[in-house]
Image: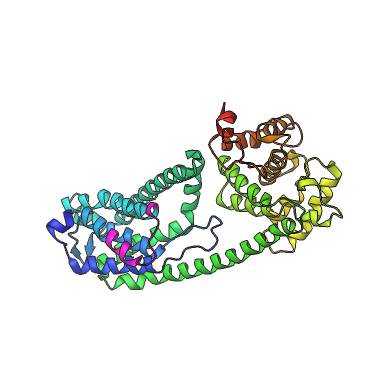
C-alpha cells in the first residue's frame, strides 16, 4: 500500500530485480518424495537479499526503501509461482526476511549515516556480511517457530536443525546476494545475470543430487515393504518406526544427516527376517532370544550393504541386537522405537505398559535418554501407535505426560 501510494522509485531497477526473483521462483522445484530435503529457490533468494542490501546502481545512489523491497519481493515471488503457489510459511519467511534486511540497511543508507567514504571502504562488505548473518539468524528463528507450530515438537531441537542447515546452500545464497549488491553498485544492472550464473549452476547440481536421493528413497521404501508383503511384519510397521524414530531423533537434537540415517535404517531394520523359515508372530523380534535377534540383525545388515545406502545405515541395522552402550545413538533410537512398536502392538500390553517395559530394560537394552525422549514425543502429541483393528488410545499423550 505504501509503494502504491507513493509510486515505485527507480522502476527499471525494481523491474530488473523483480524479474530475477520471479525467474528464480519459476526455477524452483519441489523435492520428490520429501525425505527431509528442503524446498529452495536459491536464485530468487539471492536476488531478494541483493535488492534489500542495494545502496548504489552504477555509482548512483539507490532511492528505494524497505517498503518497496517488500512490495517487489512479494509481487515477484507470486508472479514467478503462477501455477505452482509456494507454501504460505515459505512465502512469509521470504517476505519477512527481505523486510528485516531492508529495515536494517535502507534507513541507514537513505539518511547518509553510512557516508560515501564508508560505502567505498573495505569495511562496507563486512557490514553487509554482518547484516546477512543477522538476517539468516532471524530466518532460522522464524523457521524453527513454524516447524514447532506444524509438528508440535520442542523449539530447541528445531532451531538447532535450522542453524545446522545455514552453512550449506544458505551460505552460497547469502554470499551471492552480497556480491550482487556490490557488483551492481559498480557495474550497474548488467552484473545481475553475470553473477547469478554460478548460483544457477549450483541450483542445477542440487536438483540432480535430489533426484539421486529420491531414487534411493524409492529403493529403500520398496525393500521396507518386502517383509510386509511376505507376511513377516505387520503392515505399516516400518513406516511407523521411521516416523516415530525421526521425531525422537529430532527431540535428541540430531542433525538432518542423522535423522536421514535413522529413517532409512528404520525402514529396513527388519529385512533380515526374510531369512527365517517361519515368520515371527506379529513380526515382533523383541521377545526373541538375544542370539536369534543378533543373527537376524547381521543378516539384515549384509543385505542392506548391497543396496548402496550409506555405511552408517547398514551399521544401524546390524547393531540392533547389541547392548545399547555398544551402539551409535542412531541405532539406539531405532532399537528403542522398534521395541516400543512391537510391544504396543500387542493388545495385552498397550502403549503405556510398553513404555514401562522399556524403562525397566534401561540397564542393558535401551538407553534411558532415548526412552525418555520417546516418552516426551508421545506426550507432545507425536506419532501415536495404533493397534491393528483399534482406534488406538487417544489419551496416550496426556497420560504419558502425567
- Residue 82 lies, with reference to residue 114, above or below; the image says below
Q: Position of residue 382 (x, y in %)?
A: 55, 41
**Residue 221 percent coordinates (x, y):** 65, 60
- Taking the magenta stretch, the answer to whether it contains residue 30 is no
**What's the image's color scheme?**
rainbow
Residue found at the far top of this picture: 402
Question: Could you say where residue 391 lies in the image, as x and y percent from the top left?
Answer: 61, 41
User: Which residue is at a point 41% across and 63% down the rendered structure image?
Assistant: 42
Can you name the residue that lies furthest to the front here?
Answer: 389
Is 306 displayed left or right of 370 in the figure? Answer: right
| Residue 229: x %, y % from top left | 73, 59
Q: Nearer the viewer, residue 375 or 366?
A: 375
* Left-right relation of 26 to 346: left
Q: Residue at x 60, y 53 (%)?
A: 260
Residues rendered magenta in the picture: 73-89
Q: Could you say which is closer to the camera, residue 175 or residue 392?
A: 392
Amino acid at each position: 500500500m505504501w509503494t502504491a501510494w507513493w509510486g515505485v522509485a527507480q522502476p527499471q531497477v525494481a523491474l530488473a530485480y523483480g524479474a530475477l526473483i520471479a525467474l528464480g521462483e519459476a526455477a524452483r522445484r519441489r523435492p520428490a518424495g520429501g525425505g527431509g530435503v528442503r524446498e529452495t529457490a536459491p536464485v530468487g533468494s539471492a536476488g531478494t537479499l541483493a535488492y534489500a542490501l542495494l545502496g548504489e546502481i552504477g555509482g548512483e545512489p539507490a532511492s528505494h526503501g524497505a517498503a518497496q523491497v517488500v512490495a517487489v519481493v512479494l509481487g515477484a515471488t507470486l508472479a514467478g509461482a503462477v501455477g505452482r503457489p509456494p507454501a504460505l510459511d515459505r512465502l512469509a519467511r521470504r517476505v519477512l526476511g527481505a523486510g528485516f534486511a531492508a529495515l536494517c540497511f535502507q534507513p541507514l543508507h537513505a539518511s547518509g549515516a553510512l557516508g560515501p567514504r564508508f560505502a567505498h571502504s573495505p569495511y562496507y562488505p563486512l557490514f553487509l556480511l554482518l547484516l546477512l548473518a543477522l538476517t539468516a539468524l532471524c530466518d532460522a528463528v522464524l523457521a524453527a517457530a513454524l516447524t514447532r507450530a506444524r509438528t508440535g515438537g520442542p523449539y530447541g531441537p528445531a532451531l538447532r536443525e535450522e542453524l545446522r542447515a545455514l552453512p550449506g546452500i544458505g551460505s552460497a545464497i547469502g554470499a551471492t546476494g552480497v556480491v550482487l549488491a556490490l557488483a551492481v553498485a559498480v557495474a550497474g544492472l548488467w552484473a545481475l545475470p553475470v553473477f547469478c550464473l554460478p548460483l544457477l549452476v549450483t541450483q542445477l547440481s542440487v536438483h540432480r543430487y535430489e533426484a539421486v536421493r529420491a531414487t534411493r528413497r524409492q529403493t529403500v521404501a520398496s525393500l521396507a515393504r518386502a517383509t510386509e508383503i511376505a507376511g513377516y511384519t505387520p503392515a505399516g510397521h516400518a513406516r511407523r518406526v521411521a516416523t516415530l524414530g525421526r521425531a525422537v531423533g529430532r527431540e535428541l537434537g540430531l542433525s538432518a544427516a542423522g535423522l536421514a540415517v535413522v529413517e532409512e535404517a528404520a525402514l529396513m531394520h527388519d529385512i533380515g527376517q526374510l531369512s527365517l523359515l517361519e515368520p515371527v508372530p506379529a513380526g515382533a523380534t523383541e521377545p526373541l532370544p538375544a542370539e536369534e535377534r543378533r543373527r537376524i540383525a547381521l543378516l539384515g545388515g549384509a543385505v542392506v550393504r548391497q543396496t548402496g545406502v550409506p555405511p552408517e545405515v547398514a551399521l544401524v541395522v546390524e547393531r540392533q541386537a547389541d547392548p545399547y552402550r555398544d551402539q551409535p545413538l542412531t541405532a539406539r533410537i531405532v532399537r528403542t522405537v522398534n521395541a516400543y512398536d512391537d510391544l504396543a502392538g500387542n493388545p495385552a500390553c498397550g502403549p503405556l505398559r510398553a513404555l514401562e517395559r522399556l524403562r525397566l530394560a534401561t540397564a542393558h537394552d535401551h538407553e534411558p535418554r532415548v526412552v525418555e525422549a520417546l516418552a516426551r514425543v508421545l506426550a507432545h502429541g507425536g506419532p501415536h501407535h495404533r493397534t491393528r483393528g483399534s482406534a488406538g488410545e487417544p489419551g496416550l499423550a496426556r497420560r504419558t505426560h502425567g
